[in-house]
Image (spheres, helix red, strand yellow):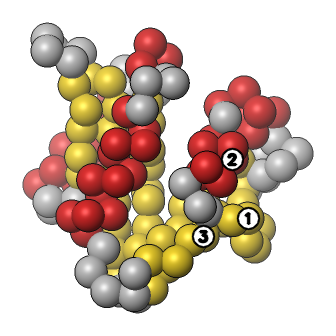
Amino acid sequence: MVDNPGFHRALDKHIRQSAALVAADSGPNLLGGLLFGATPPTYHVHWLVVSEQARGMGVGRALMSDATRRFVHGPGSIEVVTFGSDHPGAVASGARVFYESLGFTPAEAADPGPEGGSRQVYRRAAT
């Protein structure tokens, strides 16, 4: 997904708004990115992407930690919409397990994704 031109356009927009983080290697390769939004007391992870070659190396965890430190000011909640439990991508992406490892818990269902698959809100407290 980090090679997707739509991701790069969204990333550029969020960078101009000071609401994006990227992880890059020592060369020109993008390892991951995070697009964030906030309307306190609710903070939103709009998009968190880690390249295939960087998965399991702590890139996503580092991006989430840095986003929380930079963008979350005061109590509230952090929300992210990810695959529903019945979506094939739920297991393949590891997203649900990843967010649970960061203290997020499953909440209400969200609108289906662009391909029609189920989505679910994950939420955790922000202090």
Q: Quadrant of residue 115?
A: top right
- Res 57 visible: yes
Position of residue 88 measured from the top left corner of the image (x, y, whole percent) = 81, 33
User: Does label 2 or label 1 sit earlier along the sequence?
Assistant: 2
Q: Residue furthest right?
A: 86
Q: Residues within 10 Å of mark 3 (few under 14, many from 20)?
A: many
* Nearer to me, 99 or 21: 99
Q: Is residue 121 left or right of residue 42?
A: right
User: In the picture shown, does residue 1 fall above or below 60?
Assistant: above
Q: Find disc 2 in the rendering and name its residue.
A: 96
Residue 1: assigned label: none
Task: Determine the residue positioned at 35% across, 53% down.
Answer: 65
**Does the residue at mark 3 contact the one at mark 2 (Cβ under 8 Å)?**
no
Type of amino acid at the residue the image marks with label 1: Pro
Q: Is residue 84 left or right of residue 17?
A: right
User: Does label 1 or label 3 sit earlier along the sequence?
Assistant: 1
Type of amino acid at the residue the image marks with label 3: Arg
- Res 4 visible: no
Q: Find disc 1 in the rendering and name its residue.
A: 106
Task: Determine the residue positioned at 56% across, 71% down.
Answer: 124
Q: Find disc 3 in the rendering and name its residue.
A: 123
**Does the residue at mark 2 contact the one at mark 1 (Cβ under 8 Å)?**
yes
Q: Secondary structure at mark 1?
A: strand
